[in-house]
Image (spheres, rainbow, N blue to C red):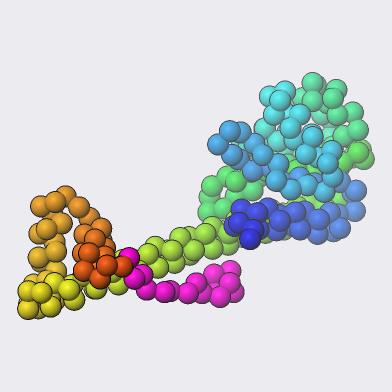
Amino acid sequence: MPTDIEEFERALTDCVTIAEQAMPDSAMLSITLLADYGLRTVAGTHPRAELLDGLQEAMKQGPVLDAVESGQPVTAGDLASRWPRFAAEAPEVRRVHCEPLESEGALLGVLTLYSGQAGGFADETRVAVRVTAAHVGVLFRTALDVARMREVAAQLKEALTTRAIIDQALGIVMAQRRCTAQQAFEILRHVSQDKNVKLQQLATSLVERVSGEPAQRSRFQDPPPDIVR
């Protein structure tokens, strides 16, 4: 089963592929995201685009790094004057544009266009870049929301399961002590504190000791995939 990250990166690949078709400049596109260890190219329309991204990071110079540092778009048609070492290693690139990718005010990475044609980028290209960058931000927020929802669902599922075991233990104490549910809970809480053992662990131990079987965990089925996507 693909992870949230894999689904997100697959969506980014589809995103740059669609964007490329809307651009008349025959540009190579890449999406580079910020990572703990530096920059990571997660999507591209051509293997060379990923190599160009990595080349800039290795040389510590280039339009991608400038866009990351400034958080502003970077457009250049004369690479040699600004990034001579990068230009020397990428002679096929005549112009480049880097568009920062943001989500809720935070910088995610950079969308980069590499073109072998001289001159400025067409208006259609600039529009496609802005639309694509905005779409990447939406994709990120959606992926983040899905991840958060799944985390909350897992926590809720564990809480319900834990509560079911505690309820079994309460029933045992109520039967043994002939007390109310509130009194049974107070008894378990005091024992938990005295023995420095979590209430859930104490309840599990009590159920297993009395029943002679592992504590029965309630069965909670995961929701259908379309609910959390």
Instruction: Give me the residue at 78% from left, 39% from top.
Output: 50
Res. 73 visible in picture: no
Q: Nearer the viewer, residue 84 or 204?
A: 204
Instruction: Give me the residue at 52% from left, 59% from top.
Output: 147
* Quadrant (top left/top right/bottom left/bottom right) for the N terminus: bottom right
**Main SS type for the magenta part?**
loop
- Judge whether residue 117 is colored magenta: no
Indicate the position of residue 93 as horizontal and vertical percent values. Answer: 87, 34
Residue 53 lies left or right of residue 178; in this view the side is: right
Residue 182 lies left or right of residue 21; in this view the side is: left
Indicate the position of residue 160 as horizontal and vertical percent values. Answer: 34, 70
> Where on the picture, by quarter, is residue 57?
top right
Instruction: Give me the residue at 70% from left, 46% from top.
Output: 42
Tell me where the magenta segment starts and ends, as one range. Answer: 214-229
Q: Reply above or below: 137 against 166.
A: above
- Judge whether residue 228 is colored magenta: yes
